[in-house]
Amino acid sequence: MDVDEIRGLLEAGLGECDVAMQAEGNKLGLMLVSEAFSGLSRVKRQQLVYSFLNEKINSGEIHAVSMKCLTPEENN
């Protein structure tokens, strides 16, 4: 798994954001802070992130993803 490529996908999709990532094998842990999550439910936030990662998930490059998605205000 190319974590730099994944970081690029997330940053391209979310715009200005903070990305903390932990990768082990084909499992990925994410802590994301972005204004893009404002007004979205937890499920909608996760669906948004999955939309950027679907190609990697479908190919099997990423098998499991755990994530925490916050707005900057929620991160304080």
Image: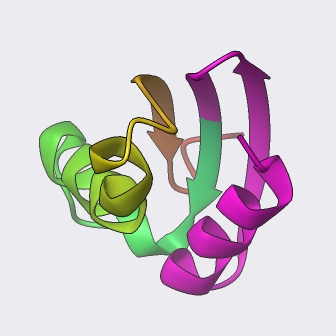
The type of colouring in the image is rainbow
- Residue 72 in sight in this render: no
Question: Eyeballing the image, is 76 above or below 55?
Answer: above
Q: For residue 20: magenta?
A: yes
In the image, 47 versus 73, the foreground residue is 47
| Residue visible at 40% across and 67% down in the picture | 52
Residue 17 x/y as whole percent: 70, 68
Q: Residue furthest front?
A: 59
Query: In the visual, does 23 lie left or right of 71?
Result: right
In the image, 18 versus 58, the foreground residue is 58
Q: Quadrant of residue 25?
A: top right
The quarter in which the C terminus is drawn is top right
Question: Eyeballing the image, is 56 above or below 74?
Answer: below
Question: Eyeballing the image, is 59 above or below 26?
Answer: below
The quarter in which the N terminus is drawn is top right
Q: For residue 60: magenta?
A: no
In the image, 20 versus 22, the foreground residue is 22
| Residue visible at 58% across and 22% down in the picture | 26
| Residue visible at 30% across and 56% down in the picture | 54
Region rendered in magenta: 1-30
Query: In the visual, does 74 lie left or right of 49?
Result: right
Residue 65 x/y as whole percent: 44, 26
Q: Quadrant of residue 6?
A: bottom right
| Residue visible at 23% across and 65% down in the picture | 39
Q: Residue furthest right?
A: 4
Query: In the visual, does 17 lie left or right of 71?
Result: right
Total tally of numbered discs in the picture = 0
Residue 36 x/y as whole percent: 43, 74
- Residue 38 in sight in this render: yes
